[in-house]
Amino acid sequence: MADERRFRGPIDLHTHSSVSDGTETPAELVRAAAVAGLGTVALTDHDSTAGWLDAAAAGAEVGVTVIPGMELSTRIEFASVHMLGYLFDPGNPALVAETARIRQGRLTRAEEMVDRIAQDYDITWADVMDQATEGATVGRPHIADALVARGLATDRSAAFAGILHWRGGYYQPHYAPAPLTGVRLIREAGGVPVLAHPATGGRGRVIPEDRLARLVDAGLFGLEIDHRENTEDGKARLHELAARFGLAVTGSSDYHGEGKPNRLGENTTDPEVLDRIIEEATGAAPFYAS
Ligand code: AMP
Ligand code: FE
Ligand code: FE
Ligand code: ZN
């Protein structure tokens, strides 16, 4: 089996470029993955596939296999839930339409948040637009960068801990479909869905079992357990759930370049798990490095 594999490890299945809220272009990110010693990296920008081809071209140059993916925004009431999707058809009409709707919703929401922040701080929408690449999926990280540029926060993390915190007085959710819709959209596009960092709030806030059961019935493949923001007791609970529901376990960095402390390859995924993702996917193939 091992010598049939056309990808090398270590494998990091969750990263962001400037196509969403990472600070490096897709090509820079893949080159950084090579420097970090990774053999395979998934590009999973929020609600966008616009970086796939640039990442693939860089991967071919530096000998890194690129797994095309996305982190789809979903939500349950006010709680945002992130759904990773791998190897789906990027032209699938339903997914293309839904991601366009989410990106538009994110833009409107960011503008409304900035309007409110601007009542108390010296910041404009143009400041935020200066921080985002043309066409990027806009999020709070771009508002954070604008606050930093204005000297209103020391770095992204400080902005998230203060003005941009969900209890900071300016927070607003954005449009996103339900997680169940997310799983279905990814599967219908031939992709493989993995629930991203499901235990950031600890054991007590891990997704309820009946809700998880419905996601599994709809085709959920795995849980991203090895992620720095999952708490230790939350991870223990997730391992119980993965065993009970026969879900795969992944690990990844959720690298955002300089915008977050997460380092490439700080968590990795077992090659057997990636083999199964590739086997199940029918929407796209990995961009193999060799
Ligand atoms: P939003 O999706 O617009 O609500 O913004 C949340 C996103 O900001 C998540 O994807 C986080 O990964 C990202 N993010 C980037 N840098 C940071 C940071 N330093 N602290 C917290 N979240 C961050
Ligand atoms: Fe992000
Ligand atoms: Fe996320
Ligand atoms: Zn992410």
Image (spheres, rainbow, N blue to C red):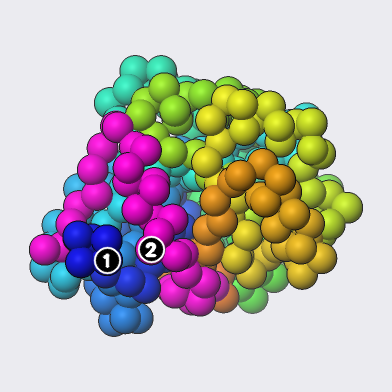
Vertical order, 289 against 69 (above or below): below
Magenta region includes residue 271: yes
The magenta stretch is 262-290
Q: To which quarter of the image does residue 173 belong?
A: top right
Q: Quadrant of the C terminus?
A: bottom left
How far across and down, in percent of the image, does residue 141 sit?
Answer: 56, 56
Quadrant observed for ligand 1 in the rendered image: bottom right
Does residue 163 appear to the left or right of 174 in the view shown?
right
Residue 281 visible in rendering: yes
Image x and y of residue 233, in percent: 81, 65
- Mark 1 or mark 2: which is in front? 1
Q: Amino acid at mark 2?
A: Pro
Q: Secondary structure at mark 1?
A: helix
Provide residue 163's location: percent of width, then percent of height.
75, 58
Q: Confirm or deny contact between disc 1 and disc 2 (CB under 8 A).
A: yes
Amino acid at dot 1: Ala
Q: Earlier in the sequence, mark 1 or mark 2?
A: 1
